[in-house]
Image (spheres, rainbow, N blue to C red):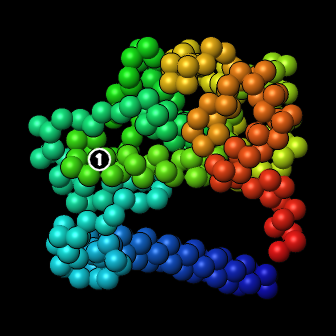
């Protein structure tokens, strides 16, 4: 008989707990709805306006007049091979539409192509081009090729690519002559190291190979460029290497022989 009051008390406590749980859940949902409403309809508009007041100019100073200063004083050509155009360059693209496009001679075209494919592994020469004809500069140059400063930008890229890569090799993956030329260069331990492309493994090989042949007057791979100039056939490379002339050419182009050993000494 005494167990009935205890049972009723337990049922009462369970009922109270359920009521509390329902209230807590309801309060949590109401709080979530209120916070969401505040974020999307109150706080968000003010956040969207914040960048207008905190916009920075090219020098990194906060203010509203930085973009005007950028328009007045364009920076000199950057030493980076490929970069995003500045605000002023984007604004002047429309005004340059009627200007003639810059023309490349073969040495400039070679430098532009080399810089383009060296900049990013995914940079490919379009298969639609005719490798027997000069390439459209817009395909391989990252600046406005109709700009009054296009010639200066081009000269900067020519200087940069051959100073960064004094030795550039265009080889085949499974080829005895290509392995030989890679061994010759590997023994020199160059700094900066050579930039090597296994051209026959690239998606653009069908147009890149004849394009390189036209620009360097070569007829086969491997191809070695030292300071932006072709060294010649594999037979010529062997002869230059044996006489020591190849070392001299590479040093004059800006590379350092035994570069890593000399760095350790210093």
Whether residue 82 is visible:
no
Quarter that holds the N terminus: bottom right
Q: Nearer the viewer, residue 176 or 49?
A: 176
**Image height check: is 260 above or below 56?**
above
Q: Nearer the viewer, residue 198 or 179?
A: 179
Q: Quadrant of residue 234?
A: top right
Write the residue at 11% across / 37% down.
Answer: 98
Quarter that holds the C terminus: bottom right
Q: Nearer the viewer, residue 4 or 148?
A: 148
Write the residue at 29% across / 83% down.
Answer: 62
Write the residue at 67% across / 31% down.
Answer: 231
Answer left or right for 37 relative to 229. left
Residue matched to label 1: 150
**Image height check: is 71 above or below 159?**
below
Write the residue at 81% across / 67% down.
Answer: 263
Residue 214 pos. (x, y %)? 51, 19
**Image height check: is 191 above or below 244?**
below
Task: State the SS at label 1.
Answer: helix
**Image height check: is 61 above or below 128?**
below
């Amino acid at each position: 008989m005494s167990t009935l009051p205890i049972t009723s008390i337990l049922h009462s406590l369970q009922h109270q707990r359920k009521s509390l749980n329902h209230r807590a859940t309801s309060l949590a949902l109401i709080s979530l709805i209120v916070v969401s409403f505040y974020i999307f309809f109150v706080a968000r508009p003010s956040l969207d306006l914040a960048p207008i007041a905190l916009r920075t100019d090219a020098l990194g100073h906060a203010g509203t007049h930085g973009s005007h200063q950028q328009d007045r004083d364009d920076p000199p050509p950057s030493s980076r091979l490929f970069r995003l155009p500045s605000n002023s360059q984007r604004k002047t693209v429309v005004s340059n539409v009627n200007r003639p496009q810059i023309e490349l001679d073969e040495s400039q075209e070679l430098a532009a192509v080399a810089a383009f494919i060296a900049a990013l592994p995914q940079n490919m020469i379009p298969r639609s081009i005719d490798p027997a004809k000069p390439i459209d500069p817009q395909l391989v140059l990252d600046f406005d090729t109709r700009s009054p400063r296009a010639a200066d930008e081009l000269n900067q890229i020519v200087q940069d690519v051959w100073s960064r890569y004094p030795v550039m090799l265009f080889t085949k993956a499974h080829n005895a002559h290509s392995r030989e030329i890679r061994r010759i260069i590997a023994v020199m331990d160059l700094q900066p190291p050579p930039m090597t492309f296994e051209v026959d493994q690239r998606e653009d090989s069908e147009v890149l190979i004849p394009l390189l042949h036209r620009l360097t007057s070569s007829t086969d791979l491997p191809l070695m460029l030292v300071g932006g100039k072709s060294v010649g056939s594999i037979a010529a490379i062997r002869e230059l290497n044996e006489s020591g002339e190849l070392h001299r050419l590479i040093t004059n182009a800006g590379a350092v022989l035994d570069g890593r050993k000399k760095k350790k000494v210093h």
